[in-house]
Amino acid sequence: MKSLFYTFIIICCFSNIINAQSDRFETRIKEIKKDIEIITAQEKATLEEEVADINEKLSEKKITQTEAELQKRAKAEACADRIEARIEPLERELQRLVKGEVEAAESDSDVIEDAMEDIRDDIEDAKEDIKDAMDDFKISVKNKKNKKNKREARTTSQFVFAFGINNVAQDGDLATLDNNGIRANNSRFYEWGWTWKTRLLQNSPLLNLKYGPSLTYNNLRPENNTYFVKNDQQTVLASHPKTLTDETYFRMINLVFPVHLEFDFSKKRRSDDQVIVKTQKSFRLGVGGYGGLNIRSKQILEYKEDGLTTEQITKGDYNVNTFVYGVSGYVGYKDISIYAKYDLNPLFSDNALDQNNVSLGLRFDFH
């Protein structure tokens, strides 16, 4: 690789001395130089990622320090081989270009001698440039390692997404989920939210307070051609007078503020006599609750009449409770967990039987 840089330096010196060089020659030299810079940058980035991965394995004690050094050396050698292989065709082209220009200038030996003297000086400068570049690379790798060893902030933030099945339990009896007029496999819930997580212990990831707003969509699908009907102060299921071509779609949109006490069993570690604390690296358990408001309710019906398909969307007050509150919890590993929530408030405000919304699904906390 050094020979390539030296050859390039020779070309640059001759381009300043020999006025007979063509524009085509100079343009191609610049193109080759750019190609070399791109190849070098690409392989350097690849090597940095490989070294960072090795450092991660070392910090997690999956490999020893000796194994890490051997792997880094092997990756560096492989990187050098790839660079040599990719720039070899460019180097050969450079040599052909230089040979043609030197032959054109052979009639002036004094000029060549002076140029060679300049070249010797430039070679020494090139050595220093290469050394500086390697030092920069070592600093870059060190900075990445330091970043991995950096303590996590006491308070962090996450984007939350959850989905799963949704249903209602009557009078708090979960056994009624099987025969309550709601189709379980098609009734689903979705949740989008933003949370902050604050460690309650300075040097331990075990106890965390997790809080933030969420938007929840609780959907219910009545079966057997039924739909929700508002009858004065009560909302009940009734048979639809027409044959529905799709199951009724009843949706409640809530804006809530969940709060959880999270137990995070990630291991803390030491580096350079410093305790490194990072959360969401192992099993997690969260228990808590939520409170908020119902901001919209609607029902969608679809049926055919006289060969025409009608989709009926009804929005408004279905006697759904305005205030929403309940308990929730999750257990999982790293970013993924099993998530359950139960509304303590009745779904409808004045029904003879209380119906409480129940949800079970998967939760993703993108750290």
Image (cartoon, rainbow, N blue to C red):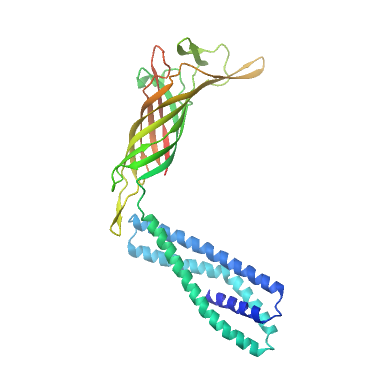
Q: Disc count in the image?
A: 0
Instruction: Give the x, y percent position of residue 90.
Output: 61, 71
Instruction: Give the x, y percent position of residue 261.
Output: 32, 36
Is 87 situated left or right of 169 in this image? right
Is 34 situated left or right of 266 in this image? right
Residue at 67%, 73% (x, y): give it.
Answer: 26
Could you say which quadrant of the image residue 284 lies in? top left
Instruction: Give the x, y percent position of residue 251.
Output: 50, 24
Foreground of the two, 78 or 252: 252
Foreground of the two, 70 or 27: 27
Quadrant for the C terminus in the image: top left
Q: Is residue 62 visible?
A: no
Instruction: Give the x, y percent position of residue 259.
Output: 36, 33
Could you say which quadrant of the image residue 352 lies in? top left
The residue positioned farthest toward the top in the image shown = 232
Q: Is residue 341 visible?
A: yes
Residue at 38%, 31% (x, y): give it.
Answer: 340
The residue positioned farthest toward the bottom in the image shown = 110
Q: Is residue 149 above or below residue 343?
A: below
Q: Is residue 213 above or below residue 72?
A: above
Residue at 36%, 38% (x, y): give it.
Answer: 210
Could you say which quadrant of the image residue 9 lies in? bottom right
Foreground of the two, 212 or 217: 212
